[in-house]
Every structure is written in C-alpha cells, then in structure tokens.
Amino acid sequence: THIHDIGMEKVQIARLMLPDDANTAGNVHGGTLLKMIEEAGAIITTRFCNDVPDKDSFDFEPSVTTLARVERTDFINPVHIGNVVQIVAEITYASSHSLECSVSVWGEDILKGVRKLTNRAVLWFVPCSINDPTKIMTVPEMHYSSEAEKEAGLKRYNEQKKARTGALRRNKTLTNMNDDPYNNNEQREPEPYSPRFARSVLIHMIGVSDCTLQGFARGGVIMKLMDECAGLVAKRHCRTPAVTASLDAINFHKKMRLGQVVTIVGQPLFTSNKSMEIEVQVTVESITGGQINKDRACDAFFTFVSLDKQGKPLPTPQLKLQTLEEQQLFEEGKLRYEARKKLRKTNQKSSDTTKKSNIDKSKSATSHLQNGIDVDPTVGAQREKNKELNSKEISPKKPPSPLSCNVVQL
C-alpha cells in the first residue's frame, strides 16, 4: 500500500494576466480565477490518485478526478491586468472516495515587487475511472502528521457531505420560472429594481475546449459561466460596473458531457446597503436523440459589489419585492448575509490573534537575544561552550607576536 504524507502533495501554477482576462471594471474576471483554481485542484488530485508504485504488478485502473463541491470563497484583493497569478494547491484530507484540496491564489505586480493574497478556496474532488466514468474509484491512503489533524479533516468531510445533501433537497428553483423576463399575461416590462427585472439567462453548448480528455465539462468552465451570469445580473440591477466579492459553496450534482446544453439562470434575492446576493442555478440537457430532459447540475449564491468609475464601492440599489415568494427569498438571503458577516468577523479576529501572537513571539525572541538569553536552551548551551573555547584560544599565556596580530587584523 502506497501512503502519501499530508503537506507533501502540492502543485503550483503561474500565469501572466492578459487583457483577455479582464472584466468590464478592468480587473481580472473572477470566473478566470475560479477556472484556474479548479485546474490546479484537478491536477494535484488526479496525480495523487494515480501515484501508485508497481502499477504493472497488479490490475491498476487509472482515474481522473471530477469536481464535486467548492466551499465558500472570498475575493480578498483584486487582480489587475499585467499581474502574475500564482496558485498553490495542496491536498489536506482524503476519504475513501473523495479528496479535499486547499488552494491559495497570489497576485504579484512584478514591476513593483508587490505580492498579495487574493483568494483562498477549498475544493472536493471525486476520482472516476477512465474506462468507466460512472465508476467511483478508491483514493490511496494518506498519512497525517497527527491524529487530531485526521479527525479535523473527517469533521470537514462530514460537514460538506451534510451541506451537499441539504442543497440538493432545496425545492425552490429559478429554472421553474418562465425564462422570459417579461410577463406574458400583461405584456409589459418588469419594474426596474425588481428581482425579475435583473434576472438573466445564459445558454451554452459544451464544446471540446470546455471538456476533460474524457469528454466531461470542467468544473472551472461551469464556474466561470456562473460568475458571468451573476455579473450580468448585478450590472442590470445596479447599472454600474460590479465585481465578485464572494461565493458560497457550489455543489455539482450531475456531470455535464460534450455536446450537452447548459442553461444558467441568475436572479437577485437580497440587497444590503453595500452588496447584493445573487442565486445562480445550472441545468443540463441533451438535445439530440430521444426524450429531452433537463437535470439540475449545480447551484450557488454569489455576492457582488457595485463600483464607481474609480473602482470604489457604491451603495447598492434596494430590491423592490412584488410577491410573497420574493419576500420569502429576501428573508432567507438576509439570514445568509448575517451569517457571512459573523463568519468574516470570526475569521478576522482569528487572523488578528495569529498576527499578534507572531509579533509577540518575534519581540520576545529579539528581547531575549539582546539580553543574552537564548530561546532554544540547546543553542544557548552550545553558545556558552563556544565562548569558553574562544576564551581559551584568544587568551594565551604570552602576549601575541606582531605577526600574529597582523594576521588577525587581515
């Protein structure tokens, strides 16, 4: 049995951001970053599942990992055209049939030498057989640095499994509504700032460039389409440039194949003073041969922020709710908004505590060194021993000769 050590499995990719990667605000498109994040995760998890020694000694079956879920992701700092994006992916937990991959994204201005953290994401992948994509493969065993680390990973695994099941049971679907944003009965345009006014639909046929070598749509491609749809909704509602601030967990319920058609529907559900929540749902259908069925493929909640021409946040126009269902969706969105605020405060407090702890340790180490006190006792003992040896060497019984003094001076 081949066992992988946690922390040893890492992948780094880097790319220069070009004008093709820009959104209307002039920054790098959030969907582009999401696509790169998925690519890094797919590389490291596929490599992990196929890194088995002595493959010829048994009936080894190669596999390719498929994106199953993306946890909540915050866009911490914007990435600009001309920046170099570096993505670091690391496997942090492996169950018997899935892998957790943590990804950090850094943006670097190579002209100024400034490097900033822009994104953090956690993704879950499932390995599928190359020969039979419906067959879920077993993940190689992983060795953890401690039992506590393993238990923490198991807890995260159970939490995401429960969340995926809850998301699948959610009954309200935007795609059950009429895709035409106009009211067919009254033949009039929806009122500005109403949820129906900003509702947007994208339809895309999955092409060769969207797929893996096995003919399935890459999760990163679908996430980019979802981000584009959410961005269109935000711009329609705010009538200004808008950027992705965060997205909640994305659950992939069904694989999407080459030649199938995906319908991406987005609609605003909630607005605060500075942001708006947009739900995006994706359905997939085969348009050739036999009966046409639409299946729910994935969904997510995006948070967008309105910007002025200088890139500064603007107040968000408030939604005008017209139905009881819209009111109910608004209240549900408000609860999620409050939960996000609470989570941000908790994370910020934890980050501040960590920074303070590191600063205190640094100050303490500096103080100890200045006072001749060693933080590491073994280092201190060795230093005292060296002092004693040096003292013997530089304190001879006879005065040093001029020659030896010159040698010392040289």
Image: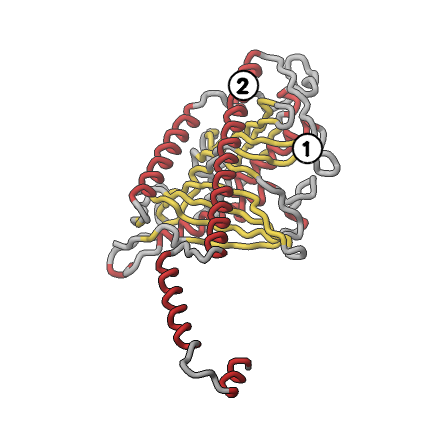
Image x and y of residue 396, in percent? 41, 80
Q: Relative to residue 303, is residue 44 depicted above or below?
A: below
Give residue 263's mark: none
Tell me which numbered mark, 2 or 1, is placed earlier along the sequence: 1
Can you identify the residue that label 1 sits on?
313
Determine the residue positioned at 64% across, 30% down.
Answer: 234
Q: Relative to residue 112, is residue 77 depicted above or below?
A: above
Q: Secondary structure under badge 2? A: helix
Image x and y of residue 400, in percent? 47, 83
Residue 287 in view here? no
From the viewer's perspective, is 200 left or right of 355? right
Determine the residue positioned at 43% across, 33% down.
Answer: 253
Q: Relative to residue 44, is residue 379 depicted above or below?
A: below
Image x and y of residue 30, in percent? 59, 41
* Residue furthest out toward the right: 309
Q: Amino acid at mark 1?
A: Pro
Q: Quadrant of residue 199?
A: top right
